[in-house]
Amino acid sequence: MNVYVDGGHRPLGQMLTNTRLKRTTQIDVIKTGLGAYHTTGSCWLNSIVSEFIVSTNLRAALDPFAGKGDMLNLVGSELSMQKSGYDIDEGAGWGVNDSLVSIPRSSGSICITNPPFLAKYSARRKSIWPMVGGYYERYGRNDLYEIALDRCLDSFGHVVAILPETFLHSAYSKDRCERIVVLEENPFNDTTFPVCVTCWSPATGQDPDIYVGEDKVAQYSDIVRLRRSVGRSGRVVFNHPKGNIGLRAVDGTKEGDRVGFFPGNVFDYPRSRIKTSSRLMTYIMVGELNNEKAIQEFCDASNEILEKYRDETSDTILSGFKGNNRLGKRRRRLDYGLARKVVTEALEAMGSIPAS
Ligand SMILES: C[S@@+](CC[C@H](N)C(=O)[O-])C[C@H]1O[C@@H](n2cnc3c(N)ncnc32)[C@H](O)[C@@H]1O
């Protein structure tokens, strides 16, 4: 049976891949709607996460989105914990429960989970709104993982949750969050979605430690301070097809292909492809840079400031981008809020604009 969505135009799971040509692709409805990407790898349980779990003195682990029980099995074998779980899929073999609505409390247990992730706009684009739309409407959240995390924090004092790495820069409250561990290794075998492991406890007013793998790289408040945005101004216009500066806002797969600013006349990207929604490659118009020398100096200053930020935070100031580069390092994306801050600081550092 076809369930038609999107004003009756698209059947369930027909993802819109080209709006202009109305091109669609059929996706796996159950896998996407349930977020059924199982945590088959063990890299998520590194020494930082293990130490947190052990410090709680809790001997039982409960996964409210248990799937095949991969996370539970790992803490069972590595930390000798008792295991229990729920899943909405009765075929999974756990107690059946809709854990996006409520999770039975279980005193003496730590919640250890990798909940479903699905952004609201993706649910619409992938035409699976009839399966999951009610959750966003009921709880006013923009991603299923946020709803899942709300329920986990409601029912448990201590929580370990694998979340999208974008959580780090999201507005979701980190008040009870103790640690955020960015994983560069991939714990899944069917997706390269960048993730982090978050560790939560009952105490409020926390400022989480940020790790990349097992290395502590920053405090959450440091990253917030560095990212503090600057106001918009007509000085700098992003996504301007005639812009004099090129911006590659995402790392490439080759080691040297990093996010960077380039003189527009040498930036090898078709200007005809710039749209208001361009996010990875674009042109920026900085009207006051009116000669080649000034443009080059501006690019050098912007790249230096950006590299300093990357270095200070071991890259966590930038968003994770799908897949790693050929050296296994997480690719990163520069959002335009931070890009605006970098270029504004570059203009300030230059003082007066050099004449040609
Ligand atoms: C990303 S998988 C994770 C499975 C397991 N935690 C792991 O890490 O391997 C998410 C699981 O959540 C289940 N699920 C999705 N929506 C759910 C809901 N509303 N209530 C309970 N389980 C749900 C799916 O069936 C799937 O098994």
Image: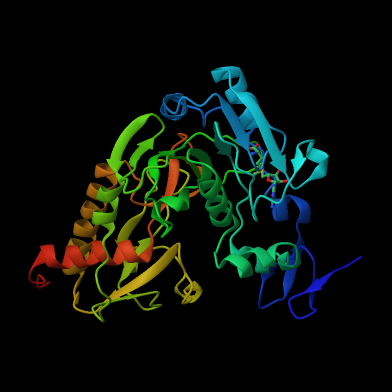
Residue 128, quarter of the rendered image = bottom right
Q: Nearer the viewer, residue 241 or 134?
A: 134
In the figure, residue 329 lies in which quadrant? top left
For the C terminus, the image quarter is: bottom left
Tell me where residue 12 appears, x and y as whole percent.
79, 66
Q: For ligand 1, which image quadrant applies?
A: top right
From the viewer's perspective, tell me whether residue 25 is left or right of residue 161: right
In the image shown, does 336 or 169 lie closer to the viewer?
A: 169
The residue under the point 31% across, 34% down is: 216
Residue farthest along the left direction in this orientation: 352
Measuring from the top left, give residue 90's x and y in whole percent. Answer: 81, 43
Q: Position of residue 256 (x, y in %)?
A: 37, 43
The image's colour scheme reads rainbow
Report whether residue 333 is seen. yes
Q: Residue visible at 53% across and 55% down?
A: 146
Numbered disc total: 0
The answer to whether residue 28 of the structure is visible from this angle is no
Residue 212: x and y in percent read 38, 36
Front-most of residues 318 and 182: 182
Left or right: residue 190 compared with residue 277: right
Q: Is residue 255 above or below residue 344?
A: above
- Relative to 262, 1 lies left or right: right
Q: Quadrant of the N terminus?
A: bottom right
Residue depicted at x 66% and y 69%: 124
For image coordinates 70% across by 76% down, the residue present is 21
Which residue occupies the extreme right position in the image? Answer: 1
